């Protein structure tokens, strides 16, 4: 489902690329550095932390409320009102804790993620010192998970997963000079990984299960959710344009 959604978005993007024309316009090339915070839709990870002990006897903490992020993008305008953004975000994820009843033993499950995205963006307002944009495109999502501390269920310590989702983002840019701008953005990422994989000492790969007995369903990691970001944009102007 998620792979098909990403494929449809990618085909739409390539089709749209044929309909826009290149033009020597102001602020055509640029880059952005940013940080942000987003909600996450985790539902099953607490169930997995309970199984760190190999079954029963544990109390799991509540899930983190969200995830921080840092990232960067490069972009160019193929039309005065159309922009391509190619970006990366590292998602800090969170830590789930499980304490064994009647002891001081504690185990943790640490989850983090990352994403590469392509975001064709329509510029609703494109002025010298103020721009509003709205974009949507595929999100190539990655997740890693590791267990640390005291636990008796040794069949899983490190896992990884990946998928193709999507992203929608709106932004407002305030010009802070001819080649810089402050960017405020908000949006939603579809970052759902339906399974994690881990490799045993023999090199055999397995799916991470929700429970310790390896007979239940796969553990999904859902980092989907709304986000807000603050960034700084830098623009590059070719020498040939400066000479004009």
Image: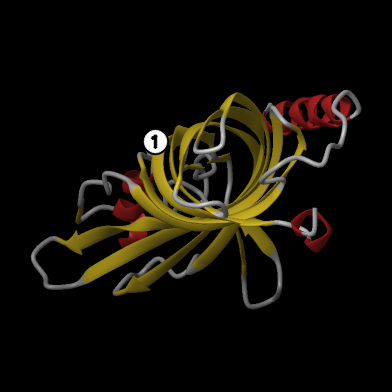
Residue at horizontal 58 percent and vertical 46 percent from the top: 195
Residue toward you, 96 or 59: 96
- The image position of residue 159, as x and y in percent, is 55, 62
Identify the coloring. secondary structure
Helix, strand or loop status at disc 1: loop
Residue at horizontal 74 percent and vertical 27 percent from the top: 9
Question: Where does the N terminus fall, quadrant-wise?
Answer: top right
Residue toward you, 63 or 65: 65
Q: For mark 1, what is the residue? A: 41
Residue toward you, 234 or 211: 234
188 relative position to 236: left or right = left
19 relative position to 6: left or right = right
Q: Eyeballing the image, is 13 above or below 59?
A: above
Would you say residue 97 is visible in this rendering? yes
Q: Eyeballing the image, is 76 above or below 7?
A: below
- The image position of residue 190, as x and y in percent, is 54, 34
Q: Eyeballing the image, is 86 above or below 129?
A: below
- The image position of residue 78, as x and y in percent, is 79, 36
Tell me where residue 163 sits by quadrant.
top right
């Amino acid at each position: 489902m998620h792979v098909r959604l990403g494929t449809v978005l990618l085909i739409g993007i390539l089709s749209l690329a044929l309909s826009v024309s290149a033009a020597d316009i102001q602020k055509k090339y640029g880059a952005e550095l940013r940080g942000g915070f987003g909600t996450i839709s985790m539902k099953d990870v607490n169930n997995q932390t309970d199984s760190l002990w190999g079954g029963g006897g544990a109390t799991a903490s509540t899930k983190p409320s969200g995830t921080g992020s840092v990232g960067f993008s490069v972009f160019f305008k193929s039309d005065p009102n159309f922009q391509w953004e190619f970006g990366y975000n590292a998602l800090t994820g969170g830590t789930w804790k499980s304490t064994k009843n009647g002891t001081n033993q504690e185990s943790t499950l640490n989850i983090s993620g990352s994403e590469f995205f392509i975001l064709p963006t329509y510029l609703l307002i494109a002025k010298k010192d103020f721009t509003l944009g709205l974009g949507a495109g595929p999100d190539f999502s990655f997740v890693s998970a590791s267990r640390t501390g005291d636990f008796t269920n040794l069949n899983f310590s490190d896992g990884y997963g990946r998928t193709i989702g999507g992203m929608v983002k709106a932004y407002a840019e305030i010009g802070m000079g001819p080649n810089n701008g402050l960017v405020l953005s908000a949006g939603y990422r579809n970052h759902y990984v339906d399974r994690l994989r881990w490799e045993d000492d023999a090199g055999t790969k397995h799916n991470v299960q929700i429970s310790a007995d390896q007979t239940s369903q796969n553990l999904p990691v859902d980092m989907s959710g709304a986000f807000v970001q603050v960034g700084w944009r830098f623009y590059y102007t070719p020498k040939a344009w400066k000479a004009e």
